[in-house]
Amino acid sequence: MQRMHDRVEGSPSHRSALSSRLRRVPAVRLLGTLAVLLAAGVVAGMGCGQEPPPPAVAAPPLGAQANDDACACSDGFYYNGQAIPIEDTRCDSFVCGRDLIAYHCVDLGANDNWRSFPGNRCGDLSCPGAGTFCGADVVNGEPAAVYQCAGAGQIPLEWTICEGGCRRGACTDAATSECPCEIPPVAGGEHIPRTCGQRVCFPTGAGSDGVKMVCTADGWQSLGLSCTQRAGTCNACRGVQDSFDNEVTTTACGETICGLGHGNRSEWICGEEGWLDLNRPCEPGKPEEEGAEFGRCPEQFQDKDGTWKSVEQGQTFCGDQVFRSPWNNDLARSFGEPLIKIKGKATQLFACPGPGARPVPYRECSALGGSGECKPVRELPTMHYHEVTGSQPQDGAKTIRDWDRCDEACPTVTDAVYTRVGPDGNRFCRHLFCGQHGITGRVGTLYQCDYDDWTYCPPSAESTRAVVGRPVPYEECSEACLPRDARGHHDVCDSSVDPQEPFGIPDPAPEPSPSSRCDAILDYQGNEVPPSSRRRGASVCGRGGQVFECRDRQLYRPDGWHATGISCGTACGICGPDPYGAQSSFCRSIAEFFGNTCSDITADPDAILCNNSDDVLLNDPAYCGHNPGLHAAGDPWMLYTCKAYCEREDGATTRWVPCEGREGDGQNRRERTRVYRFDHATYCPLGCRINERVNDACIAPTGNLQFPFPDHKMIQNIGHKPGWNDGRHLGEDIGKASGRTEGTYVFPIAPGKLLRAGINCSQYLGIALVEHRFLENGEEKRFCSFYGHLDVDELAMTLVGQDIGTDTPLGKIAYWDDIPRQHNLYCDTKWTECPAEDSFPCDPGNSHLHYAVLSHAECARFDDGGGAPPGYDECNTASAVGYLDTETRIESYTALDGTCTIPISSPDGYISPEWFVTSRLH
């Protein structure tokens, strides 16, 4: 494994001798030297921010250029302040400028020049090493780009968008429509075409549903959809540019685009891991909008009285109409068009989603009986409330609103009845229809259909004597028209139901939710960071020895990682080059004296010698780098996790597999057969703490005594009954008063014993239960505090059964919309992942902690590992006090209160944590 900070040059023997000298330097001695120098202020200002230092890095070699590739873009500077030689500039190349903004060398003939992209910052780009790399290997790199890099962790100085794709650090030829996809593992797979873009449902081996795969330039890759899932969100597709240098905003799994980045001419598809190269040639160009052949919807229409009125959402219009009004003319000019016109045939009826939108074909009137014509609303008769029955309209009565509709025959029904209506008591055989329910017409208007053959009501479908009328406006509903089963019921106006949705309104596009996890990244030692350390809010020590923070994906940050420009401060990274390639004079002198500050063992964690003594019984022991029990000189800012392996016979083969339970631990007459091997290393931003009897751990932020976390705000109080639940809240929901709540460390409200920390297959997900004992008037009292909605990756499960203080983190608050995904990993019942809300109330802003204090009796129901305290009782009774009334905090409720009338006293049920902290603990 290549060592990140080994910049020593010379013969192999010289490097070997120097390496031996490194091994003789104890880590403690080095840290002591650093501590003395730090105390003396020698290293002051050694960290770096986002301002580049003076020039320190030479530009990477650009190689020979073809004559047609040369551009004379003058007065350019790399981000490190070094001038870009004009003879080395190339057409369509990009550089990272001194202001950490991308600049494009544009071919303008005799006046080539740099074009800036203020929205495309390059400060978060990070190289994996020195050389040429594809965007997939560069942190936050563009998928179709090739980057020139000067060193690990440094910002690339130049990159180019490939016409096709990028493979093994070089641009490929133009797209060829050839994809190396093997025969899919499904029945008849040998007969399935394996062409680029082909989609196939692959079995997963878990459950009956499979996963949709697509054939790409890199073989079969996941679309991020199950076989039965029609649509979904792939957040990894955020943060890139299209061929017109605009941000690509779609995150719909399976969506295709022509060209990623300026000059790319390959088709891409959005998948689970981001944009996937289909290697199909395409010519970037603004495609004609879907529905453009039907013209454009107006902003105003001419009503029956000749006035121009605003178009309603979903309003229908006959084809072949021009709309000439001042507002419509302005709308046309905004689209660069001469006028607003709905095209198509005059007998076609179109639905309009909104002003300026493309019309959506709705009905062909010639196929609906009647005259087959489409009638514009201005040509339809004016009707008032129940006027169709013979009632005379009152003075000033409103005209029933109507839309363009087909002159159609009334549909056949089975429940039309003779009804005496009107002043003369005329008998009508009629049926009432909502517009767009069996007939055309306005949504929200009720239409009457008359049927009569003077013998039967309704007339039979075979009757030749029946006189079938046309739908006529009967009543305009004040709120909503309720469509019912036309075979047995009249439609009715009903203000208690949701309004009927007009035809042609597109489904709302799901808002791109913030991604909960960043892409895979290498740490400063070249090891891939585990998924549990790639959650939003996490910090890692990346290549080049700088801290990277996992944040939201956005333009210029498609992988989600933010390069802070801050040195990690590890024994290995403190004297490495900063993100701009610079090294302080102090670090240079340290490197000259000690050589590289990492030992060979630290540089290659696979060589870590895990403690295999008989005293080690944990299946996954974790050690700080400076723990003598590690049996190796590790980095004191790293936590090394080992794993127990046991021998298993598999037929004639013997394999080493992870031990289960107490297998091979040598206890209770069991033979000691297990061995420990290194599994992974985790960077500790605040240092690593050696613990007794339990695993070592990264130092967490200090807790705020007697509250789960500082700077919190109340979201929902105890006793509150929300409108969507039949019970009262049995705890308090809190979040951060400022900043994001997810990822916040949660601490116990008082010292105690951790009874439980684990996974609950409700919306709680990660839970913790802490026991507290107090002396009150000489008598011991027992209470428990409960915490829910914790992230499963951060639970303090190794501390169960231990005494803990208020500075011991129980875990981190989960990102709310990531709860279904984590639930599906550990629970038998499966939930649809967000943003779909089939089985979980998705809301990216709902991350919070639910916590409560339980009486001794209530705690006893759950401290043996069964279930979890309910979040609400079953009392469909509103609390006598307000939502956030302070009086609520001194009351508590129990799910066992069958009468739902008398609040249970504080010691007997569910107790307000805030009241408990301020009243009982002070």
Image (cartoon, helix red, strand yellow):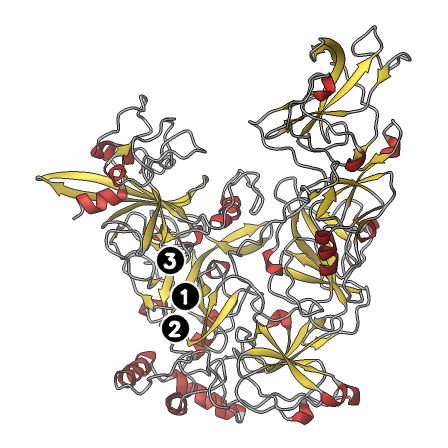
**Number of on-image labels:** 3
Q: Which residue is mark 3?
A: 738
Q: Amino acid at mark 2?
A: Gly
Q: Residues within 10 Å of mark 1 (few under 14, many from 20)?
A: many
Instruction: Identify the disc placed on residue 640.
Output: 1
Q: Label 3: how many residues lie within 10 Å, few (<14), some (14-19) or many (20+)?
A: few
Question: What element does badge 2 sit on?
Answer: loop
Helix, strand or loop status at disc 1: strand
Numbered disc 3: secondary structure: loop
Residue drawn at 71 percent across, 55 percent down = 331
Q: Are marks 2 and 1 in contact (CB under 8 Å)?
A: yes
Residue toward you, 79 or 6: 79
Q: Outermost residue, right direction? A: 464
Outermost residue on the left side: it is 778
User: Mark 1: which amino acid?
Assistant: Tyr
Q: Pinpoint residue 66: horizontal percent, then vertical percent.
A: 77, 88
123, 199: nearer the viewer: 123
- Amino acid type at mark 3: Ser
Marks 1 and 3, the one that precedes in the sequence? 1
Closer to viewer: mark 1 or mark 3 = 3
Residue 10: x, y in percent? 53, 94
Would you say residue 666 is visible in this rendering? no
Is residue 658 or residue 717 the one in the foreground?
Answer: 717
Report, in whole angstroms, how far the alpha carbon at label 2 lies from the one at label 1: 8 Å
- Residue 325 as seen in the image, left or right of residue 50: right
Up-down: is 717 above or below 554? above
